[in-house]
Structures are given as C-alpha cells and as structure tokens.
Amino acid sequence: MKKIFYISLFAMMINAQDIAGTYKLTGLYTLWQQITRGTTDITISDIHGLGLTLPVSTIPPGQAIGWYGLEPIGEPILNALGLSLYVTFNEDGTGTATGLYPIAGTNQYDFGCITSLQMLPALTNFLYQSNLNSGSEIPYNSIVGPLSYQSPFMGETVGNIGIYNSDFFPNLPLNPFNPTLCDGMGNCIDLNISPFGEDIIVGGDPLPGVTGAYVL
C-alpha cells in the first residue's frame, strides 16, 4: 500500500532571524491515508493448523482505505515520551535533523499482533529552499480531498519551504502543486476516494489537493 502522510509540525525558534537557524519540535499532529498500489486480496485462515484459507474480497488498485493518525501531541507529552527533534537550517541551503522520532511498531505473538509506539534515532542531512514571502495559503483540503479534521491554521497566509535529498523527510517542493498518482515511468492508477466507486479520479489527472510545506 502507498501511504500519504499529512504532518503538521509546530516548531519553537531557538536562534534564528529568518528560516536559517535551529528549531525544536514542540507539537505533532500526523494523519495518513492508505491507498492500494495493486490488486489486494483479503483472505481469512483457520487458527487450528489445518491450512485452510478462504478469499473473502478483493480490493482494486487505487482504493483509499481510510484515515489513520495520531491525535495532537503537545510538548509535555513529547517530553514524557522521550521524543525530541531538532532541525537546523544553514544559510548555505543545507540542513540537518537529529533526535528521536516515533513510529508504530508491530510485534507478532502466538495470540496475535500488538502495535506499540517505538522511538527511532533520527539523523539526516538534507537540502532546502525557502520563501517566507510567497503568500501561500494553508489549504483546506488534503491531497485526496477534504480533510477529516479542522486545523486553526487553514486559510492563513504563510511562506513555503522545500526539502530535498533526505532519508528522513519526504521530498517537499518549494512551490506547492497538485500531484498525480503516477510513478517515474509514467504508469498511473485511478484513485477511488469513496467506498463504492462512485467518486473516482482518473489516473494521471491532478489530485484535488496540493503537496507542499508551509512556514508560519
């Protein structure tokens, strides 16, 4: 499955007059949307070791599988969890990020699976561009349509930042644009954003929302 992430990071400036400087993560709100890449079969199997498996459904490519995410987390909870993230933007367009970052880890047991919050060390270098006077507006829609939450920052006029060549952050364009569900070879899939297939975005057509990063 392809996961599309929507992340709002609320940062406290430590020592910076512009975007250049070091910033500390003080809040986190994460949402993601799962979309099937190819045909996905759903099966059920017996638990008695008889080797019985029964197909029950098939999910076609491009099917949105609902929203997932973390509730808003403030600085006191981040500190209690031991989560820390410091991001440095250098004046030459390079940057670094260090700290500990949460992921959802799944452990397999005889009685089933348990998913728990785990911390991984974050250490990455990246390149960036910024335009704090771009006059962009924080969108009201996610990439695939209306957001399932309301942010107090929707509609605010802000600046933009682009992040590239990081093994921790996704590539984010300086100038937000409407992406498509296509790979680098030009292969595209339709996107079904409704449970019964009545609302389909044709593969290759721009998605309703934009991809980008914003600076308040």
Image (cartoon, rainbow, N blue to C red):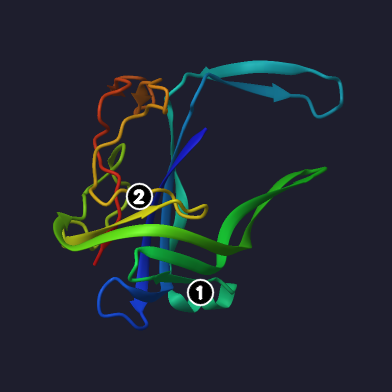
Badge 2 element: loop
User: Label 2 to label 1, Cα distance in Å?
Assistant: 27 Å
Position of 58 with respect to 215 (left or right) is: right
Badge 1 element: helix
In the figure, residue 112 lies in which quadrant?
top right
| x, y percent for residue 146 | 26, 42
| x, y percent for residue 210 | 26, 43
Q: Residue under circle 1?
A: 77
Q: Residues within 10 Å of mark 1 (few under 14, many from 20)?
A: few
Q: Which mark is residue 125?
A: none
Vertical side of 165 occupied by 93: above or below:
below
| x, y percent for residue 123 | 56, 64
Of all residues shown, which one is farthest toward the front?
Answer: 92
In the figure, residue 191 lies in which quadrant?
top left
Three-letter amino acid code of the residue under disc 1: Ile
For the point 78% across and 25% down, the residue is: 46
Q: Which mark is residue 172?
A: 2
Position of 19 with respect to 88 (left or right) is: left
Chain-order first, disc 2 or disc 1:
1
For the point 35% across and 76% down, the residue is: 21
Q: Nearer the viewer, mark 2 or mark 1?
A: 2
Q: Residues within 10 Å of mark 2 (few under 14, many from 20)?
A: some
Of all residues shown, which one is farthest toward the right?
Answer: 49
